[in-house]
Image (cartoon, grey):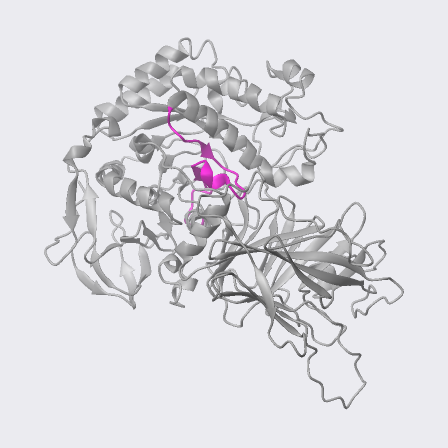
Amino acid sequence: MTNYHLFDFLDFPEDLNTKASLWKSYRPTVIEVVDGDIIITTPFQKQKLAADMAADEQAKQVFYKVVLRQYNDKILRMYCDFSVGSEDGKKAVSLPSDESEMLLFSENISKIPLNFECQDPSTLQTFVVNTPDGKVRAIINLTEPPLDRWSNLQPDAQPTLDIRLFPDGKHEVRLAAYDHFSPPRYDAFSLAFVSDGSNSRSTVAFECKADECFCGTGERFTKMDLSGRTFMLKNQDGQGVNNRRTYKNIPFYISSRMYGAFFHTTAYGKLDLANHSTRSVQFLANEPKVDVFLIGGDTIEEITRGYRDLTGYPSIPPLWSFGVWMSRMTYFSANEVQGICDRLRSEHYPCDVIHLDTGWFETDWLCEWKFNKERFPDPEGFIRGLLKQGFKTSLWQLPYVAEGAEQIDEAKANDYIAPLTKQQEREGSNFSTLDYAGTIDFTYPAATEWYKGLLKRLLEMGVKCIKTDFGENIHMDAVYKNMSPEQLNNLYALLYQKAAYEITKEVTGDGIIWARAAWAGCQRYPLHWGGDSCSSWDGMAGSLKGGLHFGLSGFAFWSHDVPGFHTLPNFMNTVVDSKVYLRWTQFGVFSSHIRYHGTNKREPWHYPEIAQAVKAWWNLRYMLIPYIVRESEKAVKGGGTLVQALVFHHPDDKVCWHIDDQYYFGDDILVAPVMNEEGVRDVYLPEGEWIEFFTGRKMHGNSWLSNLHVPLEYMPIFIRKGATIPIYPEKVDSTDDMDMTMVQYITIDENFKGFQLK
């Protein structure tokens, strides 16, 4: 880090030995209306490359068209294509497309024509952009700042692009026009690009207020308020939940000033949230284009709903998916699985899904989409038998074909996997010794259909869900049919999951996958889990942080491995701590989905001192399934999520912007997991009247419950006073046993005495 913007954010080499050139936006010269879009002809001036910058006046200015487009009442798009420019400003404009893999406009989205007028016709300095209803959508400022000149110690400031944007007609988002110390020392550019021939990149910056907070951006294993951080928007294997790497980058953030910004791109990029400069939010994309949708709203739910209006809404997973999933890495035979399922039933541990991870193939990890003939001699009979017991089967696989796989020759001959230009060094957490020869090319329709055919055979056997593992890394030294690897890597998760979801829905009727990676639009294909967390207190805490930000990124459903995926110090073989197991179980019960999975034994009877408590929490989970279904129906119709950060309901409460260890489960239940050995924590009750879940004790909000000592069998849970909670009144072995006409409704009022664990 040099602590200079040119090097740390714009990625220029410190010795400035580069052919790249930086071009800064100047004051617009022409404003016009074309088919309801505002077109702003903007000159860009090349800069001398130095920490103290100045205009390179030997270079002619180049003119580019900045496009403003309004969608419905709350979304304003700003677009500029730096591959289309001219020296006279007369070249045809490049307009943004409303079609891409990420965009799936809802019926709520329609273009609203924009117009403009001069605020003071005598000066022609300030132009107001509005919609037919009279709402102001932008103010374009062409005035020069007033001066009282007395010194020439510093040069005059260069002109700049100064536009105030109002996506909903109320909340202002201003391009960061004046973020510099002195005229030569910049900390952000309102709009600029770097021309480098093969590595062009573009940047845009918005003004940030001193007390502004941020959330979202995908799965972030860090604090609730993301201000002061810069994130690399590059999907990669997270290898845990306590570092900067993440499987799920979403180019969308939400500000406490009640606007959201969605950067419509698949390119690698940086998102700087008041880090390089506390005055600016900055985005840098590794492509010569800026395309950002600004979304205004009075609530966070309105903003996330606007994001879904652009990129798609999730669907509700099937009822059985809300039950318990049992797995480990891995079961190796039909007999082993059958023994576990029989014991679950005989001891009345309610469970709906059995997941087979890497061990169902001929060779462990060698994904050929076929069962081992010796260990699974009758796979269809095995799966159908489990169905009769109330168990749905989920199967692991991945989107790469190994060199030794049965399908390798077919895949290579038909370009179903992208041909390699050279051998790629292995990345990520492939725990096997397999060499994956290529990535399935989902940019190629024939490859997508081939992949769907592999899954279709399994689904027709009775398999109910495919675990779409990996997908956050692809072979970069490969030739994909319709996209460069650099543009595809982030988008790959969407194409991969879409294919698996569509064939699953077609064959089974249920829209569900179990996915790890994500990019914008993946919320359409539930559901996603948090990856390879450690079975530890910090692994649990990191998982929750990731889930909270993920829910603020447009996703309704999210899960995690209970009680963490791997162990320490021995990754595969250290025994899981029973306290971690039970505390994580409590957390899992109050998540949209609950799956047990990891590198060693995960069945509760291997932890006899807590096994009965685990069963009681599972019974509570099934009792709450009617509530979970109701909250899911609400979430997918709007902008909601099941695991909700406190700011989702209380964006004006500054305390809530700094709480990342408790959450709402649906709209009515407040959950505070215990994540330490001592069983002690503080709990913040936000505004409102609250009733303790287990005791019925009444409490007032806007208050702290400090130093709570929580017995291992319990977890702090509170319900909104006045809420009505639907429950299932009887114990069941699976959701197959549920008769939804028996659902009861409990009103949480003065007469409520608390729920009991049974």
Q: Is residue 598 left or right of residue 487?
A: left
Q: Is residue 75 above or below residue 535?
A: below
Q: Is residue 480 above or below residue 540?
A: above
User: Who's the residue at 70% across and 56% down the image?
Assistant: 65
Which quadrant: the N terminus? bottom right
User: Who's the residue at 51% across and 32% down the image?
Assistant: 497
Where's residue 513, x and y in %?
44, 31
Q: Is residue 613 left or right of residue 35?
A: left
Q: Nearer the viewer, residue 20 or 376?
A: 20
Q: Is residue 750 above or below residue 542?
A: below
Residue stretch rendered in magenta on the structure: 509-538
Does residue 258 appear in the picture of this structure? Answer: yes
Most extreme residue toward the bottom, as rendered?
150
Which quadrant: the C terminus? top left
Most extreme residue toward the right, as rendered?
58
Which secondary structure class fits the magenta region best?
loop
Taking the magenta stretch, the answer to whether it contains residue 328 is: no
User: Who's the residue at 43% across and 63% down the image?
Assistant: 657
Where's residue 360, x and y in %?
46, 19
Q: Nearer the viewer, residue 57 or 198?
A: 57
Q: Is residue 153 above or below residue 341?
A: below
Where's residue 422, x and y in %?
76, 29
Q: Nearer the viewer, residue 606 or 264?
A: 264
Where's residue 92, x and y in %?
74, 50
Name which quarter of the figure residue 404 lies in. Answer: top right
